Image: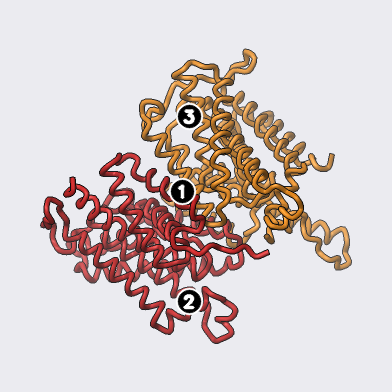
Chain colours: A red, B orange
């Protein structure tokens, strides 16, 4: 039993690490522009699918180059999304921006469908498939890649916002746009950086997890929803809360799939999310919003 | 009767269409779906447009209504009308119980909670196989009959569905102009201010949530009997999003906007079929572009534009542009 639990925990952390990266992307965009970006899952899909497309076949690029290019493509998509879909609609209501990003996600899915079709693709594992044994539990090398990669990325984001001028400038924009503008920060550019960074995190999640879960043109939908759920669970607008929410959601799902029922695992995740919201309406680590009268 | 002018126009349109094109696929098939979507959108619009409460899980109530009708008629042999009532009773109860904790949430948290509710219901529909038939769906749902008049042809469904749609539109218009409707709009403006005016905001919010859920359940029952076969896919997250899009596309806080949005979003995919592989992409692009350039919605946007043009013609002197009646809600 203990070994089984260990196995579930390991799986849960791997899945949770992916959710954490997507949730982190949600939180960054939300902080920077007050937009919940429903196209976040599409970043994951585009990253994974481009990596597959670039590295596949005889004429395919070597893996590291393909991964780098795939991530860059996704960052480009994120920047374009901000520039041509979000920026022109500034000042629109919450629901309107939600529909715009949903439109964007449908559009990106449509493009992926056109380019890659409906097939399911797999990316080769980064360093072999030989399982690692921990007691009775097993782990694939790729799981370590996911955990390590995600951990590194989270630390990087933490450092970026805390210790770099650009990171602090992005934060300043999310605190007060006008004030940021007044002290000479290029608000438009900071928005592009925030979207680019968010797309980068999504793409990284995509390429890291693609060898385990495979990928297809609609792989981003559920991941996007889970990422949103994780961000809300942690408290929207709190990046580290989003990471914690992601890990927690991954663990909940993995444990309930193993111990209760795999069919209901998503439902249990959302039930727990609802319960958390009922008792803490601003998520686990979010600050209660005060309504201005 | 100025208030109901729009309803008369809509009724006229509904009556004339099948007379002009009795065998047209777009009238007898697509328009029936559009009318069904309009029932759902009008209900959701009360919640989103007037009370300002977003719901990304409205398909759940639609699904509970449909499955109650389907299960009760096929497995317990009840007649469709009692089944419909049972569905509305069940949906209403669930909405009533869920309303209080869910509607305490605001903004994106509310969006997430309703989205979660929708996903939970969908998973339950898939998993309770012995009752719902699981992912394979539930078939053999009997058709409706009204005092011996079998609703068995496309044209008859057109009549029934449009009649229900007109009824729901009429009810919605009346609710909006009633005391509770004014309470709703006050709530949207500012919850604190509404409370100061003596409005019980919890009761008002719960009420509108239940009403929206009931109309969705009614639509669900009609859908089940019309299709004779239902599967969980019809009630998933995407359908909830589609409903929200109908409301926003038409223009929030406009009942006819919601009807308009439902029709546009039902006909658009039918028309985009000619683009084959490009269909999904073009649909997404159209959605984005419309929301970027007409954020107040297609119906409201076009109507305001028309009004301004008419006003300019009537008064050649540069008259100040009077904002349309519903603009003040959008500002909130």
Q: Which of marks 2 and 1 is in front?
A: 1
Say if labels 1 and 3 share a chain.
Answer: no
Q: Quadrant of the N terminus of chain A?
A: top left
Say if labels 2 and 1 share a chain.
Answer: yes
How far across and down, in percent of the image, does residue B74 sit?
46, 19
- Mark 3, secondary structure of its residue: helix
> Callout 1: few (<14), some (14-19), or many (20+) C-alpha neighbours within 10 Å?
many
- Mark 2, secondary structure of its residue: helix
Q: Mark 3 lies on which chain?
A: B
Q: Mark 2 lies on which chain?
A: A
Q: Which chain carries label 1?
A: A
As rendered, which of B86 and A129 lies closer to the eye?
B86
In this view, the residue farthest toward the bottom is A184
How far across and down, in percent of the image, does residue A83 sit?
50, 70
A15 lies left or right of B20? left
As rendered, which of B202 and A163 lies closer to the eye?
B202
Say if labels 3 and 2 share a chain.
Answer: no
Whether pointer 3 and pointer 2 mark residues with C-beta atoms closer than 8 Å, the reply is: no
Q: How far apart are marks 1 and 3 (CA)?
A: 23 Å
**Earlier sequence position, callout 2 versus callout 1:** 2
Q: Can residue B198 be seen in this view?
A: yes
Q: Mark 1 points at which residue?
A: A274
Say if A131 sits above or below B31 in the image.
Answer: below
Q: Can residue B260 be seen in this view?
A: no
Q: Mark 2 points at which residue?
A: A171
- Residue A94 sits in quarter: bottom right
Q: Residue B67 carries which label?
A: 3
- Mark 1, secondary structure of its residue: helix
């Amino acid at each position: 039993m203990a070994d089984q639990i260990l196995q579930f925990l390991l799986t849960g952390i791997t899945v949770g690490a992916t959710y954490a990266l997507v949730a982190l992307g949600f939180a960054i965009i939300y902080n920077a522009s007050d937009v919940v970006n429903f196209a976040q899952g599409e970043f994951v899909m585009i990253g994974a699918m481009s990596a597959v497309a670039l590295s596949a076949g005889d004429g395919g690029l070597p893996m590291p180059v393909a991964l780098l290019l795939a991530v860059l493509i996704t960052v480009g998509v994120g920047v374009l999304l901000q520039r041509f879909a979000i920026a022109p609609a500034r000042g629109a209501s919450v629901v309107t921006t939600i529909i715009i990003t949903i439109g964007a996600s449908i559009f990106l899915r449509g493009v992926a469908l056109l380019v890659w079709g409906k097939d399911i693709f797999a990316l080769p594992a980064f360093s072999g498939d030989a399982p690692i044994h921990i007691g009775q539990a097993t782990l694939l090398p790729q799981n370590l890649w996911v955990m390590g990669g995600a951990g590194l990325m989270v630390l990087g984001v933490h450092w970026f916002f805390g210790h770099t001028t650009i990171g602090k400038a992005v934060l300043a924009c999310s605190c007060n746009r006008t004030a940021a503008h007044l002290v000479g920060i290029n608000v438009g550019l900071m928005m592009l950086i925030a979207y680019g960074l968010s797309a980068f995190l999504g793409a990284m999640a995509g390429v890291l997890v693609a060898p385990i879960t495979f990928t297809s043109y609609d792989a981003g939908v559920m991941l996007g929803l889970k990422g949103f759920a994780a961000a809300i669970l942690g408290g929207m607008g709190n990046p580290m809360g989003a990471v914690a929410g992601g890990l927690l959601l991954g663990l909940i799902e993995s444990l309930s799939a193993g111990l209760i029922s795999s069919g209901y695992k998503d439902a249990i995740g959302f039930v727990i999310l609802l319960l958390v919201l009922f008792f803490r309406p601003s998520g686990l680590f979010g600050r209660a919003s005060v309504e201005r009268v | 009767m100025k208030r109901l002018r729009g309803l008369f126009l809509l009724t006229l349109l509904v009556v004339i269409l099948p007379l002009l094109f009795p065998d047209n696929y777009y009238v007898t098939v697509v328009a029936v779906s559009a009318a069904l979507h309009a029932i759902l959108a009008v209900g959701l619009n009360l919640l989103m447009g007037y009370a300002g409460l977003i719901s990304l899980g409205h398909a759940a109530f639609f699904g509970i209504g449909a499955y109650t009708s389907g299960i009760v008629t096929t497995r317990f042999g009840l007649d469709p009308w009692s089944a419909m009532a049972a569905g509305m009773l069940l949906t209403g109860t669930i909405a009533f119980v869920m309303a209080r904790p869910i509607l305490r949430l605001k903004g994106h948290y509310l969006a997430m909670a309703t989205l979660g509710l929708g996903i939970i219901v969908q998973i339950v529909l898939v998993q309770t196989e012995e009752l719902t038939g699981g992912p394979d769906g539930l078939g053999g749902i009997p058709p409706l009959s009204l005092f011996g008049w079998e609703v068995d042809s496309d044209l008859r469904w057109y009549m029934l569905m449009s009649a229900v749609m007109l009824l729901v539109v009429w009810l919605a218009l009346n609710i909006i102009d009633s005391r509770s409707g004014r309470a709703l709009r006050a709530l949207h403006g500012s919850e604190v201010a509404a409370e100061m005016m003596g409005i019980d905001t919890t009761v008002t919010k719960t009420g509108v949530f239940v009403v929206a859920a009931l109309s969705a359940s009614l639509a669900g029952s009609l859908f089940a009997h019309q299709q004779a076969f239902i599967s969980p896919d019809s009630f998933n997250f995407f359908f909830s999003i589609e409903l929200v899009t109908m409301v926003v596309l038409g223009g929030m806080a406009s009942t006819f906007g919601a009807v308009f949005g439902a029709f546009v979003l039902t006909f658009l995919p039918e028309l985009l079929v000619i683009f084959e592989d490009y269909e999904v992409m073009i649909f997404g692009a159209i959605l984005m572009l419309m929301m970027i350039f007409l954020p107040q919605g297609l119906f409201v946007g076009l109507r305001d534009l028309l009004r301004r043009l008419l006003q300019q013609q009537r008064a050649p002197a540069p008259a100040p542009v009077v904002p349309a009646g519903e603009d003040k809600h959008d500002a909130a």
